[in-house]
Image: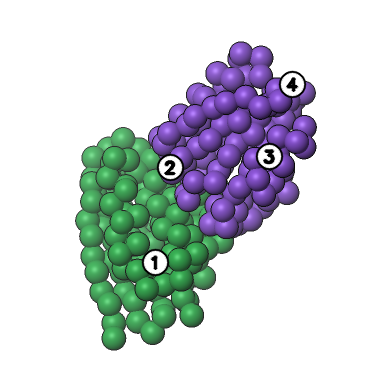
Chain colours: A purple, B green
């Protein structure tokens, strides 16, 4: 999985491209933690080109979001496609994560 | 017309992409959402087999698919020395509590219509059923 990151209005936007399987989840975790360690707390995950997420990916997102919230940070998801959204619904996480139709909307929500 | 297919892979994380490809291929005419959910669920089961049934021991996973009139059945066998659990307690994941394990099997139970599991003398057997219509 490829991850690129940029900053918009003080919000770090991560664009993920590929599958969030076990390897993808590990890479995502490392990337998010690096940003958190660099003092970033407002983050958006652009999932527009992610077609697959497994339980390892869900676990990384849940853990990171919880820890980040405890430190006053927030992580929003944007452009989540219907397949991935369905996985969030299956495990009952669709209300735990704030999801936005577009990355612009997510950035402006901070 | 009944479709039957079978695949045997090594019980190795690096081999599990073949499971996804196998299920994608068998279900190539199914609704894409149903297909992607089943690929995810079955992949999660195989992850569990590698991680818990074999727990580092070498071995293989055998998958047999029967597809007829929209009824999908998958039988999964392994020779893993460990059982998963005596009585599976399937509870929804709590996003505020993220222990190792359990989420994949929850997904499996949510996606499939019926799941039968039994511990064999040496190994484990799963039978998964899904109505695709």
What is the C-alpha distance between the residues marked 1 and 4?
44 Å
B129 or B5, which is in the foreground?
B5
Q: Position of residue B133 (x, y in %)?
A: 48, 80
Kindly state the secondary structure of the residue where label 1 is placed. Answer: strand
| CB atoms of marks 3 and 1 within 8 Å | no
Residue drawn at x 66%, y 27% as measured from the top left: A8
Same chain letter for marks 2 and 1 = no
Residue drawn at x 40%, y 52% as measured from the top left: B43
Kindly state the secondary structure of the residue where label 4 is placed. Answer: loop
Numbered disc in front, either 3 or 1: 3
Kindly state the secondary structure of the residue where label 3 is placed. Answer: helix
What is the C-alpha distance between the residues marked 2 and 1?
30 Å
Which residue, as the protein is rendered here, is positioned at the far top?
A38
Image side of residue A69 versus residue B71, left or right: right
| CB atoms of marks 2 and 1 within 8 Å | no
Same chain letter for marks 1 and 4 = no
The residue identified by callout 2 is A18
Quadrant of the rendering where the C terminus of chain A is positioned: top right
Mark 3 vs mark 2: which is more N-terminal? 2
What is the C-alpha distance between the residues marked 3 and 1?
45 Å
Q: Given the image, what chain letter belongs to the residue carrying mark 4?
A: A
Mark 4 vs mark 3: which is more N-terminal? 4
Q: Which mark is residue A104?
A: 3
Q: Position of residue B63 (x, y in %)?
A: 29, 61
Pointer 1 local density, CA inside 10 Å: few below 14, some 14–19, many at least 20 = some
Pointer 2 local density, CA inside 10 Å: few below 14, some 14–19, many at least 20 = some
Q: Which mark is residue A71?
A: 4
The residue identified by callout 1 is B127
Q: Given the image, what chain letter belongs to the residue carrying mark 2?
A: A
| CB atoms of marks 1 and 4 within 8 Å | no
The answer to whether residue A89 shows anywhere in this view is yes
Quadrant of the rendering where the N terminus of chain A is positioned: top left
């Amino acid at each position: 999985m490829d991850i690129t990151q940029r900053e918009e209005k003080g919000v770090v936007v991560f664009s993920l491209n590929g599958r969030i399987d076990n390897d993808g989840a590990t890479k995502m975790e490392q990337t998010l933690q690096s940003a958190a360690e660099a003092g970033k707390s407002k983050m958006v995950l652009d999932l527009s080109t992610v077609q697959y997420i497994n339980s390892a990916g869900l676990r990384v997102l849940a853990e990171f979001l919880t820890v980040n919230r405890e430190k006053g940070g927030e992580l929003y998801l944007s452009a989540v496609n219907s397949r991935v959204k369905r996985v969030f619904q299956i495990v009952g996480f669709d209300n735990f994560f704030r999801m936005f139709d577009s990355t612009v909307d997510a950035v402006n929500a901070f | 017309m009944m479709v039957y297919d079978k695949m045997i892979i090594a019980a190795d994380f690096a081999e599990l992409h073949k499971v996804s490809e196998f299920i994608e291929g068998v279900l190539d005419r199914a609704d894409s959402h149903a297909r992607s959910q089943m690929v995810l669920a079955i992949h999660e089961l195989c992850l569990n087999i590698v991680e818990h049934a074999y727990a580092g021991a070498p071995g293989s996973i055998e998958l047999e698919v029967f597809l007829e009139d929209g009824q999908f059945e998958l039988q999964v066998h392994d020779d893993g020395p460990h059982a998963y659990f005596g009585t599976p307690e399937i509870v929804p994941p709590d996003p505020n509590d993220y222990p190792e394990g359990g989420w994949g099997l929850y997904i499996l139970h949510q996606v499939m219509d019926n799941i039968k599991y039994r511990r064999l003398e040496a190994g484990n057997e799963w039978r998964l059923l899904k109505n695709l219509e």
